[in-house]
Image: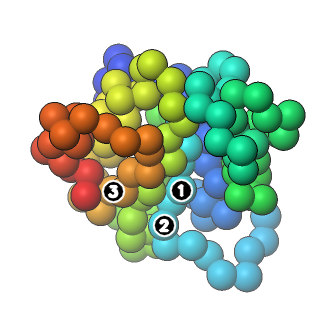
């Protein structure tokens, strides 16, 4: 998979998604049809949401979100496995969860462009509020 220079080196993948993509061995009762990815940075999110283990002042585990484990993988490997899972019909959507940090928009745009260049799949993004121009750019890149 050809990737953008702006892609983060690593990305977190929800445990269920990692199992479906073959990144981890495991058994799940109901395989998700959405791949859940989460941006990754050294350190915590710059936001400080009281409920979130990713928050700047949280003492919670950085690999957790919503009681789900999110192990980190090389981004290119996770995206390659995602494209193959879309092509074989196991995955119907990609949802990217975004921490808040200065480079996050650049990372989101690179992720959406790279996914969209290799496979046609609906892409959702869950992130902090963005400027309307950045929302437009993400939509042009292929995000819904």
Relative image position of residue 54 (x, y in whole percent): 69, 38
Position of residue 32 relative to residue 78, above or below, is below
**Disc 3/disc 2 C-alpha distance (Å):** 9 Å
Relative image position of residue 47 (x, y in whole percent): 59, 32
Task: Find out whether the residues at labels 2 and 1 contact each other: C-beta distance under 8 Å.
Answer: yes
Residue visible at 45% across and 62% down? 85
Closer to the camera, 108 or 16? 108
Q: Say which element carries label 3.
A: strand
**Disc 1/disc 3 C-alpha distance (Å):** 10 Å
Mark 3 neighbour density, 10 Å: few (under 14) some (14–19) many (20 or more): many
Residue that mark 1 sits on = 36
**Displayed quadrant of residue 5:** top left
Residue that mark 2 sits on = 34
Relative image position of residue 30 (x, y in whole percent): 66, 81
Position of residue 116 relative to residue 121, above or below, is above
Is residue 30 toward the left or the right of residue 136 in the image?
right
Position of residue 30 relative to residue 132, above or below, is below
């Amino acid at each position: 998979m050809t990737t953008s220079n702006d892609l983060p080196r690593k990305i977190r993948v929800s445990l269920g998604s990692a199992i479906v993509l073959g990144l981890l061995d495991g058994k799940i009762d109901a395989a998700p049809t959405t791949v859940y990815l989460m941006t990754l940075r050294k350190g915590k999110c710059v936001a400080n949401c009281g409920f979130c283990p990713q928050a700047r002042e949280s003492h919670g585990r950085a690999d957790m979100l919503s009681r789900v484990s999110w192990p980190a993988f090389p981004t290119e490997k996770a995206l390659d496995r995602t494209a193959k899972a879309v092509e074989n019909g196991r995955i119907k959507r990609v949802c990217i969860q975004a921490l808040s940090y200065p480079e996050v928009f650049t990372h989101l745009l690179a992720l959406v462009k790279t996914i969209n260049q290799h496979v046609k799949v609906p892409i959702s993004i869950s992130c902090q509020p963005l400027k309307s121009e950045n929302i437009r750019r993400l939509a042009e890149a292929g995000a819904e």
